[in-house]
Image: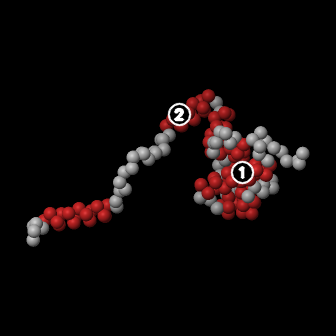
Amino acid sequence: MTGEISYALGVTDQDLWIAVGEQLLLRRNKLGLKPFDIDKAGGPNYTTVTAIERGEVGRVSSVTKYAEVMGLSVVAVLRTVLAADRALSPEAQEVVSKFERTTVAGRTALLSTAQALPEEQTQSPTREAPLEPSHVTQGRRAAGTEAQKRPRGK
């Protein structure tokens, strides 16, 4: 045995921390934050943030701080990485975790909120003509009006 722990999904320690770093990087980019922003918000410093994103964890407490600054728990991030078959984002994992730990009233509230959310609009499979900017169509209408005013054949 080499001393590396292998998880049920065949993930090594290094694979796990690289995947954790990638998830945190994705979240940071989605929020439009820079590593320096994480530092300013009370998370780990710039050097530590970039090291975590490369899979060089160092201390788990640093990963925890980094995740918390972005509104995630490190447990949600780990669940996302280890539960590849469920394919939930860290945000969705956080909701699932809250759902599992809350009261019946809390679960009812979460379900009501989820049902009230608007569905993402998908484009229809039929292809429509692209819309033209209004200044183009207005120019065409004006040109058509001028053509109608002119007598024909002159």
Instruction: Identify the amino acid type marked 1.
Output: Ala
Instruction: Identify the amino acid type marked 2.
Output: Ser
Q: Is residue 12 left or right of residue 140?
A: right
Local crowd size for mark 2, using a 10 Å CA cut-off: few (<14), some (14–19), many (≥20): few
Q: Which residue is mark 2?
A: 112
Local crowd size for mark 1, using a 10 Å CA cut-off: few (<14), some (14–19), many (≥20): many
Q: Quadrant of the N terminus?
A: top right
Q: Which residue is mark 1?
A: 19
Residue 134, placed above or below residue 87: below
Q: From where the camera sits, is residue 95 visible? A: yes
- In percent of width and height, residue 107 lies at 60, 32
Marks 1,2: beta carbons within 8 A: no
Q: From where the camera sits, is residue 76 visible? A: no
Q: Quadrant of the C terminus?
A: bottom left
Q: Residue at x 60, y 33 (%)?
A: 106
Q: Residue at x 20, y 63 (%)?
A: 144
